Amino acid sequence: MSYVINVLKNCTTLALFTITLCSESYLQAQQTDRTSPEEVHARAMVAAQKVEAEIQEALSEAQRLARSRPDKARAILEKALTQVKEDHLLSEEQRSSFQHLLTSKIRALKDRMDPSAQRVIEKSEKASLNREKRAEEVKAAGEAEKLQRGLKAVRDAFLDGKSAEAVTKAEDLARRYPDNTAAQTMRRTISTADQVMESRRSKIDANRRLAGAYRDVDTAATAPGGEVEYPKDWAEKTKRRKKPNYTVKEELILRALASPVSATFKGTRFQGVIDQLQEATGQNIIVDKATLEAANVSYDTEVTLNAKGWALRTVLRKVLGNLGLAYVIKDEEIQIVTAEQAKDMMTVRTYYLGDLVGLPDWRLGPALGEARAEELANQIMDLIRSSIDPNSWDVNHGLGTIKYEPRTRTLIIRQSAEVHSMLGSSLH
């Protein structure tokens, strides 16, 4: 019995010892985890000193390589500068001081670099900027081509009498190009013209019915002078509506100027550009040395342009315009001339609008009738200037002019033969 009691006493003592040992270990662990603020600050100081030592080491290594390998020394300093900017252990004063020191040393190394290496870097940076600029130019040119096609579609629909379709296309164009003046002007012009035309059609129908009634009475009371009777002004209107008489060769040239061309020129000789365009279109492009000399251009002048799907006229205008040159259609050929010569070679033609703006409305009286006719003529002129080669008109710093003559109900237009051809297909 005494033996059992001794065993129990020993087990109890062992258990108490174990519990005490575990409690002490637990307390030590708790004390270890409770780091004091002083210890945290001390650790941060150590980490900051380590970063400072790394920066000092980078400075020393860069100084050692400054003469033999300035490019590598510069790379080391730029890496250290990045480390300083991203570090949160250094104080604000230390970070500012290191940034200033590293920046000044990088600038000094850049100035001491081998001129050839510096030129390589500058050339690479310039090439990158040029690529971005060319990409922006190509994108802008593509958008300009899309806009011109949209404007032409609106104009064609309106001139074909499809005013509702023209209004829809103009509204869509204005939504897609909210910041473009031509698109917004086209929308306003077409909308106003459609309203005027609708009002005009209603009045014309009423006048026509009334005039028809009177004409039927007069015709019934008058014996015909022959088998067929024509209006008195039939011959005059027929003459005014006659299309320009272009030769087969001139028609081919006009179609070639409207055809799409894709070409890339990178420092290409001017003569090479002309040869390439001739080969692509099958049309002769004539240029003489005297014209080039007048514009301070030579056959070896370099041309840079990236054209994808542009109309030939757009490519020619871009290439020649940058050199102070232009082109005209003369003697069944495309001839390159100076800008001053092109201005002198422009022609003046008249386009009759009498049957569009000159129908009288006896209810309005002469003064109001003339005002209404002039208002419609102004709408047509705005439509022409905004949709047919807009950059060629004086309102957009071009050379072409357009004026309405109320006495003869005609448009007096001074333009190139090419623009006259586009006007002829629209107004005749």
Image: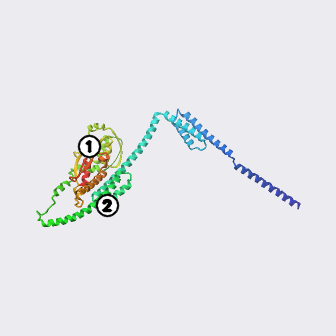
Q: Looking at this rendering, what residue extends furthest in the top direction?
A: 67
Visible residue check, residue 338: no
Residue 105: x percent and y percent?
53, 35
Indicate which disc residue 164 carries.
2
Visible residue check, residue 224: yes
Q: Nearer the viewer, residue 424 or 384?
A: 384
Tag 2: Cα neighbours inside 10 Å, few (<14), some, or many (≥20)? some
207 left or right of 55? left
Mark 1–mark 2 Cα distance, whole angstroms, equals 38 Å
User: So how many labels did they put on this image?
Assistant: 2
Colour option used:
rainbow
Q: Nearer the viewer, residue 148 or 401?
A: 401
291 left or right of 230? right
Residue 163: x percent and y percent?
30, 60
Report which residue position mark 1 lands on: 343
> Which residue is at 38% across, 55% downward?
176
Q: Nearer the viewer, residue 423 or 16?
A: 423
- Residue 170 vertical placement versus 290 (above, below): below
Tag 1: Cα neighbours inside 10 Å, few (<14), some, or many (≥20)? some
In the rendered image, which quarter contains the N terminus? Answer: bottom right
In the rendered image, which quarter contains the C terminus? Answer: bottom left
Tell me the kind of residue under disc 1: Lys
Residue 261: x percent and y percent?
32, 49
